[in-house]
Image (cartoon, helix red, strand yellow):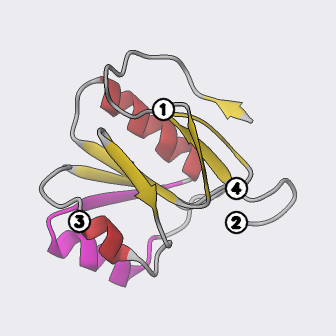
Amino acid sequence: MSLLTEANFGASLPIDGYGPGFFRVAGEVRHGNVWVMADRCGDWGGFEDPETLTALAGQIDLLFVGTGAEIAHLPKAFVATLEAKGIMCEGMATPSAARTYNVLLSEGRRVGCALIAMPPKGEAS
């Protein structure tokens, strides 16, 4: 399991670890793909499920999208759906998205992330 750097998050929900198929959000293990923002988190169905993320409109300014072990382009329809609701998103590899979310969360920024779970070692994401 990979651990992320300690910081002061107050009552916010940091991503404090991840591994093959899971994330640890504020000490709670969650399996599969997740979305996280300062005060809550939930399951996410991946790029075919932008509607789950549109519910975050007006609550975050930026969404980091973790695309798995490697950076990948975000599907155009996915981005268009989010941007139509005023959610700007930035794609990056899942570990980078989790770290970047934590840094900006610790600064009090209105950010969220949607993360594709990391595959088991040796498998592609």
**Label 4 crowding class (10 Å Cα cut-off): few <14, some 14-19, many 20+?**
some
Q: Name the residue under label 4.
A: 21
Q: Is residue 15 above or below residue 76?
A: above
21 with respect to 59 (left or right): right
Give the structural element (helix, strand or loop) at label 3.
loop
Amino acid residing under circle 2: Ser
Q: Distance between the residues labelled 4 and 2?
A: 10 Å
Instruction: Between label 1 and label 2, give the one nearer the viewer.
Output: 1
The Cα–Cα distance between marks 3 and 1, rounded to whole angstroms, is 21 Å
Please indicate, yes or no, whether residue 28 appears anywhere in the rendered image. yes
Which of the 4 image quarters holds residue 53? bottom left
- The crowding category of the residue bearing disc 1, from other C-alpha atoms within 10 Å (few below 14, some 14 to 19, many at least 20), is some
Judged from the image, the secondary structure of the residue bearing numbered disc 2 is: loop
Which residue has dot 1 on it?
Answer: 26
Sooner in the amino-acid sequence: mark 4 or mark 2: 4
Q: Which of marks 3 and 2 is in front?
A: 3
Residue 18 falls in which quadrant of the image? top right
Q: Do residues under tags 1 and 2 come within 8 Å of each other at their CB atoms?
A: no
Q: Percent position (x, y) of residue 74?
A: 44, 71
Pinpoint residue 61: horizontal percent, then vertical percent. 19, 49
Q: Give the range drawn in magenta.
A: 74-92
In this picture, residue 55 sits left or right of residue 13: left
The residue drawn where x is 55% and y is 66% is 72
Dot 4: element: loop
Residue beneath disc 2: 125
Which labelled disc corresponds to residue 8? none
Q: Is residue 53 above or below residue 77?
A: above
Which label's residue is closer to the chain start, 1 or 4?
A: 4
